[in-house]
Amino acid sequence: MSAADTVLAGLDDVRPSLEEFYKDLHAHPELGLAEHRTASRVAERLRESGYGVIDGIGGTGVVGVLSNGDGPTVLLRADMDALPVKEDTGLPYASTATVADADGRPQPVMHACGHDVHMTCMLGFAHLMAQAKDAWQGTLVPLFQPSEENSAGADAMVRDDLAGRIPRPDVAFAQHVLPYPAGYVGVRPGPFFAAADSLRVTLFGRGGHGSMPQATVDPVVMAAMCVLRLQTIVSRELPATTPAVVTVGSVQAGASSNVIPDTAVMLVNIRTYDEDTRRHVLDAVRRCVNAEAAASGAPREPEIERFNVFPPTLNDDDVAGRLAHAFKARFGDDFHTIEMLAASEDFSLIPDAFDAPFAYWGIGCVDPGLYAKAAEGGTVLRDVPVNHSPRFAPVVQPTIDTGIAALTVAALEWLG
Protein backbone atom coordinates (compact mmCIF):
# COMPACT_ATOMS: atom_id res chain seq x y z
CA MET A 1 0.00 0.00 0.00
CA SER A 2 1.11 3.57 -0.66
CA ALA A 3 1.28 6.05 2.20
CA ALA A 4 -1.93 7.67 0.92
CA ASP A 5 -3.69 4.29 0.83
CA THR A 6 -2.60 3.66 4.42
CA VAL A 7 -3.95 7.01 5.63
CA LEU A 8 -7.20 6.79 3.66
CA ALA A 9 -7.89 3.22 4.76
CA GLY A 10 -9.70 4.64 7.79
CA LEU A 11 -12.04 6.85 5.76
CA ASP A 12 -14.93 4.39 5.72
CA ASP A 13 -15.05 4.42 9.52
CA VAL A 14 -15.20 8.22 9.90
CA ARG A 15 -17.26 9.11 6.82
CA PRO A 16 -20.71 9.02 8.52
CA SER A 17 -19.50 11.26 11.36
CA LEU A 18 -17.92 13.70 8.93
CA GLU A 19 -21.06 13.94 6.82
CA GLU A 20 -23.14 14.72 9.90
CA PHE A 21 -20.58 17.30 10.98
CA TYR A 22 -20.74 18.91 7.54
CA LYS A 23 -24.53 19.16 7.67
CA ASP A 24 -24.33 20.72 11.12
CA LEU A 25 -21.85 23.33 9.88
CA HIS A 26 -24.05 24.05 6.88
CA ALA A 27 -27.11 24.55 9.06
CA HIS A 28 -25.25 26.90 11.45
CA PRO A 29 -23.24 29.37 9.33
CA GLU A 30 -21.52 32.38 10.84
CA LEU A 31 -20.19 35.54 9.21
CA GLY A 32 -16.55 36.60 9.14
CA LEU A 33 -14.86 37.24 12.51
CA ALA A 34 -18.03 35.99 14.24
CA GLU A 35 -17.33 32.26 13.72
CA HIS A 36 -17.45 31.53 17.45
CA ARG A 37 -19.54 28.33 17.39
CA THR A 38 -17.72 27.14 14.29
CA ALA A 39 -14.27 27.75 15.77
CA SER A 40 -15.25 26.00 19.00
CA ARG A 41 -16.44 22.91 17.14
CA VAL A 42 -13.33 22.84 14.98
CA ALA A 43 -11.02 23.14 17.99
CA GLU A 44 -12.92 20.39 19.78
CA ARG A 45 -12.52 17.98 16.85
CA LEU A 46 -8.81 18.77 16.53
CA ARG A 47 -8.22 18.08 20.22
CA GLU A 48 -10.14 14.82 19.97
CA SER A 49 -7.79 13.82 17.14
CA GLY A 50 -4.73 14.49 19.28
CA TYR A 51 -3.62 17.90 18.02
CA GLY A 52 -2.25 20.69 20.09
CA VAL A 53 -4.63 23.60 19.49
CA ILE A 54 -4.03 27.34 19.46
CA ASP A 55 -7.30 29.23 19.14
CA GLY A 56 -8.39 32.85 19.11
CA ILE A 57 -5.68 33.85 16.60
CA GLY A 58 -6.86 36.95 14.80
CA GLY A 59 -10.14 36.74 16.70
CA THR A 60 -11.58 33.35 15.78
CA GLY A 61 -8.73 31.60 13.95
CA VAL A 62 -7.81 28.07 15.02
CA VAL A 63 -4.56 26.18 14.37
CA GLY A 64 -3.75 22.57 15.13
CA VAL A 65 -0.19 21.23 15.45
CA LEU A 66 0.80 17.57 15.31
CA SER A 67 4.50 16.69 15.41
CA ASN A 68 5.54 13.22 14.28
CA GLY A 69 9.33 13.02 14.25
CA ASP A 70 11.85 14.82 12.09
CA GLY A 71 10.75 16.07 8.70
CA PRO A 72 9.18 19.01 6.87
CA THR A 73 6.36 21.14 8.26
CA VAL A 74 3.24 21.34 6.09
CA LEU A 75 0.53 23.96 6.66
CA LEU A 76 -2.92 23.47 5.14
CA ARG A 77 -5.64 26.10 5.35
CA ALA A 78 -9.44 25.89 5.47
CA ASP A 79 -11.64 28.99 5.66
CA MET A 80 -14.60 29.19 8.07
CA ASP A 81 -16.88 32.12 7.28
CA ALA A 82 -20.27 32.17 5.55
CA LEU A 83 -22.06 34.85 3.52
CA PRO A 84 -25.08 37.17 4.02
CA VAL A 85 -27.20 35.16 1.57
CA LYS A 86 -30.69 33.67 2.00
CA GLU A 87 -30.47 29.97 1.20
CA ASP A 88 -32.71 28.59 -1.55
CA THR A 89 -31.42 25.03 -1.96
CA GLY A 90 -34.32 23.07 -0.47
CA LEU A 91 -31.84 20.88 1.41
CA PRO A 92 -33.13 19.24 4.60
CA TYR A 93 -30.16 20.79 6.41
CA ALA A 94 -30.51 24.22 4.79
CA SER A 95 -29.60 27.26 6.86
CA THR A 96 -32.34 29.33 8.46
CA ALA A 97 -29.83 31.38 10.45
CA THR A 98 -30.05 35.15 10.61
CA VAL A 99 -27.98 37.94 12.17
CA ALA A 100 -28.90 41.57 12.77
CA ASP A 101 -27.64 43.92 10.09
CA ALA A 102 -26.40 47.47 10.70
CA ASP A 103 -30.01 48.68 10.99
CA GLY A 104 -31.03 45.88 13.35
CA ARG A 105 -32.96 43.98 10.71
CA PRO A 106 -32.56 40.19 10.36
CA GLN A 107 -30.01 39.25 7.68
CA PRO A 108 -30.06 35.64 6.40
CA VAL A 109 -26.74 33.79 6.50
CA MET A 110 -25.66 30.82 4.36
CA HIS A 111 -22.56 28.78 3.57
CA ALA A 112 -22.89 29.80 -0.07
CA CYS A 113 -19.21 29.36 -0.92
CA GLY A 114 -18.45 25.88 0.41
CA HIS A 115 -16.30 26.76 3.40
CA ASP A 116 -18.24 24.17 5.38
CA VAL A 117 -16.90 21.57 2.91
CA HIS A 118 -13.37 22.89 3.36
CA MET A 119 -13.53 22.56 7.15
CA THR A 120 -15.03 19.09 7.01
CA CYS A 121 -12.39 17.83 4.58
CA MET A 122 -9.60 19.35 6.66
CA LEU A 123 -10.86 17.78 9.89
CA GLY A 124 -11.31 14.41 8.22
CA PHE A 125 -7.81 14.57 6.76
CA ALA A 126 -6.31 15.72 10.07
CA HIS A 127 -7.95 12.85 11.94
CA LEU A 128 -6.85 10.20 9.44
CA MET A 129 -3.26 11.49 9.46
CA ALA A 130 -3.22 11.34 13.27
CA GLN A 131 -4.44 7.73 13.12
CA ALA A 132 -1.76 6.67 10.63
CA LYS A 133 1.49 8.09 12.00
CA ASP A 134 3.51 5.18 10.64
CA ALA A 135 2.78 6.48 7.11
CA TRP A 136 4.46 9.87 7.49
CA GLN A 137 7.03 11.93 9.33
CA GLY A 138 7.25 15.63 10.08
CA THR A 139 4.85 18.26 11.42
CA LEU A 140 1.28 18.86 10.31
CA VAL A 141 -0.37 22.27 10.77
CA PRO A 142 -4.08 22.45 9.82
CA LEU A 143 -5.12 26.11 9.98
CA PHE A 144 -8.72 27.35 10.07
CA GLN A 145 -8.97 30.96 8.93
CA PRO A 146 -11.81 33.40 9.66
CA SER A 147 -13.26 36.05 7.38
CA GLU A 148 -11.88 35.07 3.99
CA GLU A 149 -14.85 36.64 2.21
CA ASN A 150 -14.01 40.11 3.53
CA SER A 151 -10.25 39.76 3.01
CA ALA A 152 -9.80 40.37 6.73
CA GLY A 153 -9.05 36.98 8.26
CA ALA A 154 -5.61 36.08 6.94
CA ASP A 155 -4.31 39.57 7.70
CA ALA A 156 -5.85 39.42 11.20
CA MET A 157 -4.08 36.12 11.93
CA VAL A 158 -0.75 37.42 10.62
CA ARG A 159 -1.05 40.62 12.67
CA ASP A 160 -1.82 38.52 15.75
CA ASP A 161 1.72 37.08 15.64
CA LEU A 162 0.82 33.93 13.72
CA ALA A 163 4.45 33.52 12.68
CA GLY A 164 5.58 33.55 16.29
CA ARG A 165 2.94 31.12 17.53
CA ILE A 166 3.11 28.18 15.14
CA PRO A 167 5.92 26.19 13.48
CA ARG A 168 7.29 27.71 10.29
CA PRO A 169 5.93 25.76 7.31
CA ASP A 170 8.17 24.49 4.52
CA VAL A 171 5.16 24.52 2.21
CA ALA A 172 1.52 25.62 2.44
CA PHE A 173 -1.66 24.43 0.74
CA ALA A 174 -5.31 25.38 0.33
CA GLN A 175 -8.19 24.01 -1.72
CA HIS A 176 -11.62 25.29 -2.74
CA VAL A 177 -14.83 23.71 -3.99
CA LEU A 178 -15.76 25.03 -7.43
CA PRO A 179 -18.69 24.42 -9.83
CA TYR A 180 -17.08 21.45 -11.59
CA PRO A 181 -18.24 17.82 -11.40
CA ALA A 182 -17.65 16.21 -8.00
CA GLY A 183 -14.49 14.10 -8.21
CA TYR A 184 -12.68 16.77 -10.28
CA VAL A 185 -9.28 17.93 -8.98
CA GLY A 186 -7.41 20.77 -10.71
CA VAL A 187 -4.21 22.71 -10.09
CA ARG A 188 -2.03 24.99 -12.20
CA PRO A 189 1.38 26.65 -11.84
CA GLY A 190 1.64 30.42 -11.62
CA PRO A 191 -1.43 32.72 -11.63
CA PHE A 192 -4.61 31.04 -10.41
CA PHE A 193 -6.86 33.57 -8.64
CA ALA A 194 -6.90 37.27 -9.43
CA ALA A 195 -6.05 40.19 -7.22
CA ALA A 196 -9.17 42.14 -6.27
CA ASP A 197 -9.68 45.77 -5.37
CA SER A 198 -13.01 47.29 -4.43
CA LEU A 199 -13.49 51.05 -4.70
CA ARG A 200 -16.19 53.29 -3.26
CA VAL A 201 -16.40 56.31 -5.57
CA THR A 202 -18.38 59.31 -4.33
CA LEU A 203 -19.29 61.80 -7.06
CA PHE A 204 -20.22 65.32 -5.99
CA GLY A 205 -22.79 67.44 -7.80
CA ARG A 206 -25.16 70.24 -6.91
CA GLY A 207 -28.68 69.16 -6.20
CA GLY A 208 -31.93 70.87 -7.05
CA HIS A 209 -35.43 70.54 -8.47
CA GLY A 210 -35.92 67.92 -11.16
CA SER A 211 -37.68 70.52 -13.32
CA MET A 212 -34.66 72.82 -13.29
CA PRO A 213 -31.61 70.74 -14.20
CA GLN A 214 -29.91 73.83 -15.58
CA ALA A 215 -29.44 75.03 -12.00
CA THR A 216 -27.77 71.80 -10.91
CA VAL A 217 -24.76 69.58 -11.54
CA ASP A 218 -26.41 66.18 -11.87
CA PRO A 219 -24.34 63.41 -10.21
CA VAL A 220 -26.68 60.75 -11.64
CA VAL A 221 -25.71 61.65 -15.19
CA MET A 222 -22.11 61.94 -14.04
CA ALA A 223 -22.29 58.37 -12.63
CA ALA A 224 -23.86 57.08 -15.83
CA MET A 225 -21.02 58.55 -17.88
CA CYS A 226 -18.48 57.04 -15.49
CA VAL A 227 -20.02 53.57 -15.80
CA LEU A 228 -19.67 53.69 -19.58
CA ARG A 229 -16.18 55.21 -19.49
CA LEU A 230 -14.86 52.60 -17.04
CA GLN A 231 -15.83 49.82 -19.42
CA THR A 232 -13.30 51.15 -21.93
CA ILE A 233 -10.32 50.56 -19.62
CA VAL A 234 -10.06 46.83 -20.33
CA SER A 235 -11.29 47.00 -23.92
CA ARG A 236 -9.17 49.98 -25.01
CA GLU A 237 -6.20 50.30 -22.63
CA LEU A 238 -5.05 46.70 -22.11
CA PRO A 239 -3.70 44.20 -24.65
CA ALA A 240 -6.16 41.51 -25.66
CA THR A 241 -3.86 38.94 -24.04
CA THR A 242 -3.96 40.65 -20.62
CA PRO A 243 -6.92 39.45 -18.55
CA ALA A 244 -8.70 41.95 -16.30
CA VAL A 245 -12.23 42.78 -15.17
CA VAL A 246 -13.78 46.12 -14.18
CA THR A 247 -17.29 45.85 -12.77
CA VAL A 248 -19.57 48.58 -11.43
CA GLY A 249 -21.69 46.59 -9.01
CA SER A 250 -23.71 49.38 -7.46
CA VAL A 251 -24.84 52.93 -8.23
CA GLN A 252 -26.81 54.75 -5.55
CA ALA A 253 -28.15 58.28 -5.77
CA GLY A 254 -31.20 60.20 -4.67
CA ALA A 255 -34.54 59.13 -3.26
CA SER A 256 -37.13 60.95 -5.37
CA SER A 257 -38.01 61.19 -9.05
CA ASN A 258 -38.17 65.00 -9.02
CA VAL A 259 -35.11 65.80 -6.91
CA ILE A 260 -31.61 65.87 -8.36
CA PRO A 261 -29.32 64.77 -5.51
CA ASP A 262 -26.04 66.25 -4.35
CA THR A 263 -24.07 63.00 -4.58
CA ALA A 264 -23.91 59.60 -6.25
CA VAL A 265 -21.94 56.62 -4.96
CA MET A 266 -20.54 53.86 -7.18
CA LEU A 267 -19.04 50.59 -5.98
CA VAL A 268 -16.41 49.34 -8.41
CA ASN A 269 -14.65 45.95 -8.39
CA ILE A 270 -11.38 45.31 -10.24
CA ARG A 271 -9.72 41.93 -10.94
CA THR A 272 -6.16 41.65 -12.27
CA TYR A 273 -3.38 39.05 -12.23
CA ASP A 274 -0.16 41.08 -11.95
CA GLU A 275 0.93 44.24 -10.19
CA ASP A 276 1.67 46.26 -13.34
CA THR A 277 -1.85 45.68 -14.70
CA ARG A 278 -3.34 46.29 -11.28
CA ARG A 279 -1.60 49.63 -10.95
CA HIS A 280 -2.59 50.68 -14.49
CA VAL A 281 -6.27 49.85 -13.97
CA LEU A 282 -6.47 51.57 -10.59
CA ASP A 283 -4.83 54.68 -12.03
CA ALA A 284 -7.16 54.56 -15.03
CA VAL A 285 -10.26 54.41 -12.83
CA ARG A 286 -9.12 57.47 -10.93
CA ARG A 287 -8.29 59.30 -14.17
CA CYS A 288 -11.66 58.47 -15.76
CA VAL A 289 -13.87 59.48 -12.83
CA ASN A 290 -11.92 62.68 -12.27
CA ALA A 291 -12.22 63.56 -15.95
CA GLU A 292 -15.97 62.88 -16.05
CA ALA A 293 -16.45 64.98 -12.92
CA ALA A 294 -14.48 67.82 -14.49
CA ALA A 295 -16.44 67.51 -17.74
CA SER A 296 -19.68 67.77 -15.75
CA GLY A 297 -18.54 70.86 -13.90
CA ALA A 298 -18.52 69.11 -10.53
CA PRO A 299 -17.87 71.40 -7.56
CA ARG A 300 -15.12 69.10 -6.27
CA GLU A 301 -13.14 66.03 -7.26
CA PRO A 302 -14.58 62.59 -6.50
CA GLU A 303 -13.56 60.74 -3.35
CA ILE A 304 -12.18 57.24 -3.97
CA GLU A 305 -11.93 54.77 -1.08
CA ARG A 306 -10.21 51.41 -1.59
CA PHE A 307 -11.45 48.43 0.46
CA ASN A 308 -11.69 44.61 0.39
CA VAL A 309 -8.23 44.28 -1.12
CA PHE A 310 -7.11 40.76 -2.08
CA PRO A 311 -3.64 39.78 -3.31
CA PRO A 312 -3.24 37.63 -6.43
CA THR A 313 -2.90 33.90 -5.81
CA LEU A 314 0.28 32.86 -7.63
CA ASN A 315 1.07 29.17 -7.21
CA ASP A 316 4.72 28.24 -6.89
CA ASP A 317 5.71 26.52 -10.14
CA ASP A 318 7.71 23.74 -8.51
CA VAL A 319 5.14 23.00 -5.80
CA ALA A 320 2.24 23.03 -8.28
CA GLY A 321 4.17 20.78 -10.67
CA ARG A 322 4.87 18.28 -7.93
CA LEU A 323 1.20 18.29 -6.92
CA ALA A 324 0.08 17.85 -10.50
CA HIS A 325 2.19 14.71 -10.81
CA ALA A 326 0.85 13.31 -7.52
CA PHE A 327 -2.77 14.22 -8.29
CA LYS A 328 -2.56 12.68 -11.75
CA ALA A 329 -1.25 9.45 -10.22
CA ARG A 330 -4.08 9.38 -7.66
CA PHE A 331 -7.07 10.74 -9.57
CA GLY A 332 -6.29 9.75 -13.16
CA ASP A 333 -8.69 11.27 -15.67
CA ASP A 334 -10.37 13.30 -12.91
CA PHE A 335 -7.20 15.41 -12.63
CA HIS A 336 -7.01 18.55 -14.77
CA THR A 337 -4.86 21.60 -15.30
CA ILE A 338 -7.36 24.16 -14.10
CA GLU A 339 -7.79 27.49 -15.87
CA MET A 340 -7.14 30.89 -14.28
CA LEU A 341 -10.18 32.18 -12.39
CA ALA A 342 -11.16 35.76 -11.65
CA ALA A 343 -12.20 34.94 -8.08
CA SER A 344 -9.93 36.22 -5.32
CA GLU A 345 -8.39 34.92 -2.09
CA ASP A 346 -6.40 36.22 0.89
CA PHE A 347 -4.79 32.84 1.68
CA SER A 348 -1.40 33.82 0.23
CA LEU A 349 -0.87 36.34 3.05
CA ILE A 350 -0.32 33.39 5.39
CA PRO A 351 2.53 31.61 3.56
CA ASP A 352 3.95 35.01 2.61
CA ALA A 353 4.31 35.76 6.34
CA PHE A 354 6.72 32.80 6.52
CA ASP A 355 8.26 33.28 3.07
CA ALA A 356 7.01 29.77 2.29
CA PRO A 357 6.07 28.47 -1.18
CA PHE A 358 2.45 27.44 -1.67
CA ALA A 359 -0.08 25.95 -4.05
CA TYR A 360 -3.84 26.28 -4.18
CA TRP A 361 -6.11 23.87 -6.07
CA GLY A 362 -9.78 23.37 -6.84
CA ILE A 363 -12.11 20.40 -6.40
CA GLY A 364 -15.50 19.85 -8.01
CA CYS A 365 -18.73 19.75 -6.00
CA VAL A 366 -21.55 19.48 -8.58
CA ASP A 367 -23.58 16.32 -9.14
CA PRO A 368 -21.74 14.71 -12.09
CA GLY A 369 -24.99 13.76 -13.82
CA LEU A 370 -26.38 17.29 -13.58
CA TYR A 371 -23.13 18.75 -14.86
CA ALA A 372 -22.87 16.31 -17.77
CA LYS A 373 -26.45 17.05 -18.85
CA ALA A 374 -25.87 20.81 -18.68
CA ALA A 375 -22.57 20.50 -20.56
CA GLU A 376 -24.21 18.44 -23.30
CA GLY A 377 -26.93 21.07 -23.71
CA GLY A 378 -24.55 24.02 -23.46
CA THR A 379 -26.36 25.33 -20.38
CA VAL A 380 -23.70 25.02 -17.66
CA LEU A 381 -23.72 28.74 -16.88
CA ARG A 382 -27.51 28.71 -16.58
CA ASP A 383 -28.16 25.39 -14.87
CA VAL A 384 -25.17 24.86 -12.54
CA PRO A 385 -25.34 27.12 -9.47
CA VAL A 386 -22.00 28.77 -8.72
CA ASN A 387 -20.36 29.87 -5.49
CA HIS A 388 -22.22 32.71 -3.73
CA SER A 389 -25.53 31.69 -5.32
CA PRO A 390 -28.44 31.07 -2.91
CA ARG A 391 -28.83 27.72 -4.73
CA PHE A 392 -25.20 26.64 -4.27
CA ALA A 393 -25.44 23.12 -2.84
CA PRO A 394 -22.36 20.89 -3.05
CA VAL A 395 -23.19 17.20 -3.24
CA VAL A 396 -21.91 15.61 -0.06
CA GLN A 397 -20.25 12.73 -1.88
CA PRO A 398 -17.92 12.26 -3.55
CA THR A 399 -17.02 15.89 -2.76
CA ILE A 400 -15.89 15.28 0.83
CA ASP A 401 -14.01 12.08 0.00
CA THR A 402 -12.23 13.84 -2.87
CA GLY A 403 -11.25 16.81 -0.72
CA ILE A 404 -9.84 14.55 2.00
CA ALA A 405 -7.92 12.50 -0.55
CA ALA A 406 -6.48 15.63 -2.22
CA LEU A 407 -5.26 17.04 1.10
CA THR A 408 -3.76 13.68 1.99
CA VAL A 409 -1.93 13.25 -1.31
CA ALA A 410 -0.59 16.81 -1.13
CA ALA A 411 0.66 16.54 2.44
CA LEU A 412 2.27 13.15 1.88
CA GLU A 413 4.26 14.49 -1.10
CA TRP A 414 6.31 16.27 1.60
CA LEU A 415 5.71 14.12 4.68
CA GLY A 416 5.42 10.62 3.27
Image (cartoon, rainbow, N blue to C red):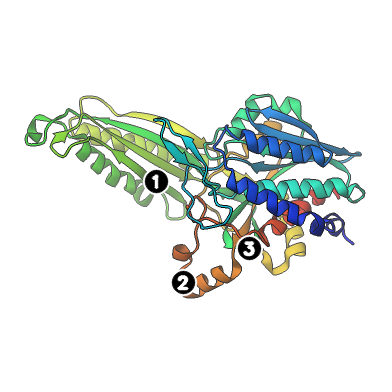
User: Do callouts 3 and 2 mark residues in contact (Cβ within 8 Å)?
Assistant: no
Where 316 sits versus 59, above or below?
below
Mark 1 vs mark 3, foreground winner is: 3
Question: Which residue does the image show at 24% across and 33% down from the upper left?
Answer: 293
Question: Which residue does the image show at 77% across and 63% down from the upper left?
Answer: 329
Mark sitting on residue 246:
1
Query: Residue 16: horizontal and vertical position, in percent?
Result: 74, 56
Mark 3 vs mark 2, foreground winner is: 3
Q: Which residue is mark 3?
A: 182
User: Do callouts 1 and 2 mark residues in contact (Cβ within 8 Å)?
Assistant: no
Question: Which residue does the image show at 7% across and 36% down from the upper left?
Answer: 211
- Number of on-image labels: 3
Q: Which residue is mark 2?
A: 378
In the displayed structure, does residue 328 sit left or right of residue 200?
right
Of callouts 1 and 2, the N-terminal one: 1
Query: Residue 75: horizontal and vertical position, in percent?
Result: 74, 40
In the displayed structure, does residue 325 sit left or right of residue 211?
right
In the displayed structure, does residue 342 sit left or right of residue 231?
right
Where 283 sits versus 374, above or below?
above
Determine if residue 76 is in view. Answer: yes
Q: Quick one: SS at disc 1?
A: strand
Comparing 314 with 48, the one in front is 48
